[in-house]
Image: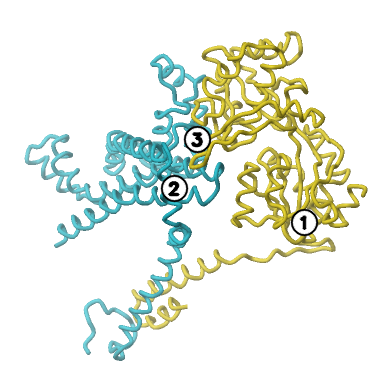
Chain colours: A cyan, B yellow
Amino acid sequence: MPPRGRWRGSGPAVVPPGVRPVSAAASIAGAAVIWVALLGPVITLLTHLSGHAIASALTYPGALDPLVTSLEAGAVTLAVLFGVCTPLAWMLARGRLPFPRVWEAGVLCSLLLPPLVVGLLLAFMVGPYTAIGGLLGHLHLSATNTFLALVIAEVYESAPYYVVGAQAAFSAVDPRLEQQAELLGDRPRRVFRRVTLPLASPGLATALAIAWARAMGAFGAVIIIAYHPYGLPLQIYTTLDQTGLPTALPYALVLLVVALPLPLAAYVWSARAQGRRRG
Amino acid sequence: MLAIVGGMLALRNRRRTQVGALLVIASVGLATACSSAPSTGSGSKPTGNVNVAYASSLQYLNEKVISPAFTKAEGYKFVGTGGPSGALESEIAAGTIHPDVFESVGGDNITPLFPQFTKWYVQFAGTQMVLAYNPNSPYASQFKAFADGSEPLQGLFTLLETPGLKLGRTDPASDPQGRNFIYMLELAQSHYNLPSDTVSKILGGTPGSSSSPQIYAESALDSTLQSGQLDAASAYINQAVELHLDYIKLPSAINLGDASMAEQYKTATVTIIPQGGTATTKKGSPQVIDITIIGKPTKAALAFVKYTLSKAGLALYKAGGFSLPPLTATGTTTAIPAAISSELGT
């Protein structure tokens, strides 16, 4: 058998029959072991749920209110991230900012801070006796234990993930294409809308999907400044405290079922879009 | 194992070798992460861990004070899990946690574990409710006057009704402190002959409701007060002492700290509706700390309970703001291990 194009090993060019299929199968099996291990908590969740427990947990009055709260807060969070953080990510990717490493270090700082600490610091930042809190008070708003507080906590927990992902998406767009559009007379805003954004959109979709997952699962900052209104993660936590594990676990399944479709769709669309571009 | 075989078979292929190596590393990493390393130690003192599940209000004392003192005295390492007493009891009963020792606020969180997990408990310390306040609050001078006794205390409850005053408390459905704060207000309403709507005005709604902007997670309440974003908050006296909070001490008729007033405390009730559960009415009771051993006593567990009930251990509790009622055993006292009975003087 002649060596194939991708075979660049330094050893003998001829592979004994059967070794490569065995090797491939073993690698797949190894990957499967790791995949199953990573999915361990999800598998455990499914094995510890019964139809009765799910039905009784989901049918008591107000059981699904936290789900609605989570979806609404998650949607507002994504809108804020897309509107506010996308331009920042583009400027970071295109080196339009002085001292770019300083800007990037700032984003990484907020990524590295544990969410619980972010929540504690947000209490100092937007609590009722702070300048921002006072300003919100004049507008009859509050950033403590309100829907606004929940959105703020989710934005702070998910924004760094979105900015890093979106920056990578914009960096993958060939700047020569943007330059050519400019040479053809397009203004920068039109170039961004007609060239940059469509080309970066698969990567942006993935970044938004990750941000969505972070927002839906946000807990550390949320529990500090937004104990009310309950979203799904706090519903799981408080139900665990109040009525124990069997009642709390069904909400984890709800969280998965509700939070999964959007990132999954984004991944599928992103993969197809990139496939079309390559193909 | 399969990943190792895969990696070996792919030795001739550089790319596949890299993939195989990564798989091997990841597999080994996962395997290592999933296994628990045995504890090791040196010296003549015994080694090993004692796993203690304790009420959240004991967190500071256990983790920062008792843990190092116990390890220094006995050699064993303290491994703690803090949480609301009721939730810990549920988790022990469900088998999701397996502590050696359980420390609860109130014996009613231990008796449901009789007789499968334990048959006894010992009451050894007590705490009481206080009102912690923010020294930079617009109401600080008034709080201070109540704290130093220059103003009669009943005025405090009228002040707490002030619209715009930012009061923090914990969830009555999940946290005993949240309920205790409500019992304290009810006892105060009765003790000071305050108008019958005083409690609901202070709480801004139905007493047992979990939905109130006043309600914070237990872990967040003190930090929010310390960050200056609340005017006042419920607290146990030991938390106020440990965290150096300014606080107003309350009389024993309403502070739930006097074991001899159990009958009076019982008159305070609150009906809570847990998520996914049925409405339950709970009654006030003295805030006593109880300790027991879960399952078959280990040497480390015996050493920890013995140390906690010793003069040295109780002195640490006293320094932390706790009161020290006489040690009292409840349940099948003959089941108490001899090493612990000796501390009880029985």
Q: How crowded is mark 1: few (under 14 residues within 10 Å), some or many (20 or more)?
A: many
Q: In which quarter of the image is residue A232?
A: top left
Instruction: Give left or right: position of B137 versus A8.
Output: right
What's the residue at 33%, 51% (across, down)?
A260
Look at the image and tell me whether residue B282 can be seen. yes
What's the residue at 61%, 17% (across, down)?
B136
Q: Mark 3 lies on which chain?
A: A
How many angstroms separate mark 1 from mark 3 (CA)?
36 Å
Find disc 1 in the rendering and name its residue: B301
Q: Are marks 2 and 1 on the same chain?
A: no
What's the residue at 45%, 40% (across, down)?
A110
Element marked by disc 3: helix
Find disc 3 in the rendering and name its residue: A119
Q: Where is residue A91 in the image (x, y as percent from the top left)?
A: 28, 38
Q: Residues within 10 Å of mark 3 (few under 14, many from 20)?
A: many
Above or below B81: residue B171: above
Q: How crowded is mark 2: few (under 14 residues within 10 Å), some or many (20 or more)?
A: some
Q: Do labels 1 and 3 share a chain?
A: no
Q: Where is residue B92 in the image (x, y as percent from the top left)?
A: 64, 53
Comparing A146 with A136, the one in front is: A146
What's the residue at 35%, 81% (across, down)?
A23
How many angstroms separate mark 2 from mark 1 (CA)?
39 Å
Task: Give amino acid for label 3.
Answer: Gly
Find disc 2 in the rendering and name its residue: A56
Q: Which of marks 3 and 2 is nearer the N terminus?
A: 2
